[in-house]
Image (spheres, rainbow, N blue to C red):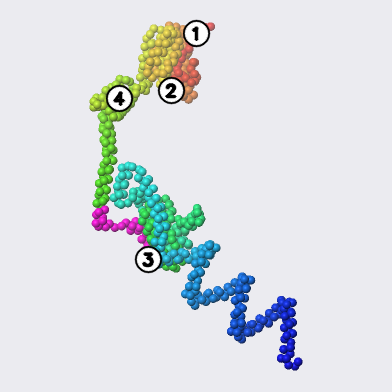
Amino acid sequence: MHDPQVLSDRLLPLFASLLERKVAQAPEEVIRALAPIIDRAIARKSQTDKLAMSQALAAALPGAIAQQIDTAPEEVIQALAPIIDQAITCKSQTDKTAMSLALAAALPGALSKQIGDAPEEVIQAIAPIMGRALHEQVRLERDAMVDALYPVIGNTISKYMGEVVRQINQRVEETFSIRGIYRKLNARLRGISEAELILSEALPFTVQAVFLIHKTSGLVVVEIQREDGQALEADMLAGMLTAIRSFASECTVNPEKTSELTEIDYDDFKIVMEVAGYCYIAAVTQGDPPAGFATQLRQTLSAIILNYGYGELIAEFDGDPDSIPQAVVDLIENLLRSPEVMLPPQRHTTENHETWRSRSGVIASWAVLLGLLMLPFVLYSWQQARRQQLADRVTTALDANPNLTVYQLDATVKGREVRLQGQLPNEILSQQAATTATAALPAHLNVVNEIQMVNPPPDPGAIQAEVARLTQTFNQMQGIQVGSRYDHETNRVIVEGSIHQGQDARTITQAFEQIPGVDVVVLMLATAQTPIQRRIYFDTNSNFIDPYDLESKLMPIRSFLNQYPDLQLQIIGHTDRSGSEQRNLELAPQRAAAVRQALVAQGIAADRLKVTGSTQPPPNVRLEDPLWLSRIVRFEQIAPAGAN
């Protein structure tokens, strides 16, 4: 028992039996008890003899890893991921070529798989470098990029521009005129389309100012303006354009489609913009820009971007204009002189000579065509001139006739007929006009008389004279004593007085109605009227007695008073409503006094004549009647004193 070796040999079988039984009964307890011992044993063995430990685990390790991958793959991935990352990083630093060859076969498939599973992540990962990659590719192999993009962009632009030019030419060519033919000929000689010629003539093109502006910040990188024009506020304009561009981009109809604002029209000015990279060019122009100006803008911006676009000069511009190279300023300044620079110099070569010969043929063809087109116009103009000459000859002959000079007559030539038009008062003058026109024309032309007969406007003086003549004629007839008045405003004749019988009234009416210009005849007649029933009429604001009334009315009253010496008369004067009340109160008795004075002058005693005045209308005169019917003096018989 004192020998450890002997004791160990005797106890080992017993421990082995007990351990086997314990493992069979409670394996988990055995594992928990032995795990710390095994861990320390493996750790110590690994430190003292790595080779032996590796050889011992080599056979079991692949199976253990495979079993663990099948049982808990996520734990294996989490355990191996840091080691794999470090391994790849270390290998990439030590041997890039071998690492590239190792990943080359798997990389396309991995990208395809990722694009299919998560395309948005791929886009977000690649997008930041795409712009710089394309820019670098354009700088290194510009022709290759042009060849790659030309089939798509070139065909699209060509188709669009061709459609626009076709529409413009179609609209312009629809108008056919002499001016249009001249414009077509001029455009053909200058070797440009008619649409370009129209635009260039209507709107001469000038560049007022050019600005190179940082697209993100809106800072003015380069500013070039004309010295002879009004200076523009560059910073304010740049800020405004940047804000407008941003607003237009955000408010686009299709949010998925990227678009840029290229033009802004203001009055007769136009701001043309070309955008690329981190900057854009804004040119303030007047007139319609030629096609070459847009090309020059693109070429200038391309040159700036390829040389200075993504360096610290423009891409990270901080507002210091001194940091911009002079070459960029020169490129922008060239745009200010674009109308002159873009005109190519003339070359006197054989090709130009052939071109001139070709243009000469075109000129000759156009001249012949123009002559044929002008021939109908020339013939028509000659015929019109000939017709006008004949019409002037007839008009001159009519004006030379003293009976027709005062009338407006026109002559129109249509084919073999000469039509006379106008207005004349009677048929005699119309026939005289036709005879005069026939004598002034060649024999093969016929005169068509279309002159209308119209009544001339009445002459108030002539009508008044005719009324007075008829009145005097009727007063010479037995038993008729009348007076008349003509109202030219209403074309009426008022006849008053006395007649012998009723048939005389019809005769008087018919006679006055025959006077041209008299529309209405008003009779105020009485049968066997006494002289004192007549009325004396006066002009406006007057107490003067018409000489005709002195003879035709006052003389019979004098005879009547002499025939009845005991008879006394009340002479009453009246006024119309036109004057003031005070004036009418004065004028009414003045008219009565004038009549009494005339009778006294003819031998009638003054004490037999009493005078009074009234501003009221006389008897039988209404307010709506003409005013002259109220401007009268009338007579009333005064009964003798003591008469019943």
Q: Residue at x 37, y 58 (%)?
A: 296
User: Callout 1 environment at 10 Å: few (<14), some (14 to 19), or many (20+)?
Assistant: few
Marker disc for residue 448: 4
> Label 2 vs label 3: CA separation?
100 Å
Alpha carbon distance from label 4 to label 3: 86 Å
Q: What's under tag 2, amino acid-wise?
A: Asn
Q: Is residue 345 highlighted in magenta?
A: yes
| Secondary structure under the numbered disc 1 in the rendered image | loop
Q: Earlier in the sequence, mark 1 or mark 4?
A: 4
**Badge 2 density bin: few <14, some 14–19, many ≥20, Cα 10 Å:** some
57 relative to 226, above or below: below
- Residue behind mark 1: 640
Query: Looking at the image, is 18 positioned above or below residue 384?
Result: below
Q: Which residue is mark 2?
A: 541
Residue 142 part of the magenta segment: no
Q: Earlier in the sequence, mark 4 or mark 3?
A: 3
**What residue sits right under mark 3 in the picture?**
327
Boundaries of the magenta span: 326-355
Residue type at mark 4?
Val
The image quadrant of residue 461 is top left
In space, the residues marked 4 and 2 are separated at their CA atoms by 56 Å
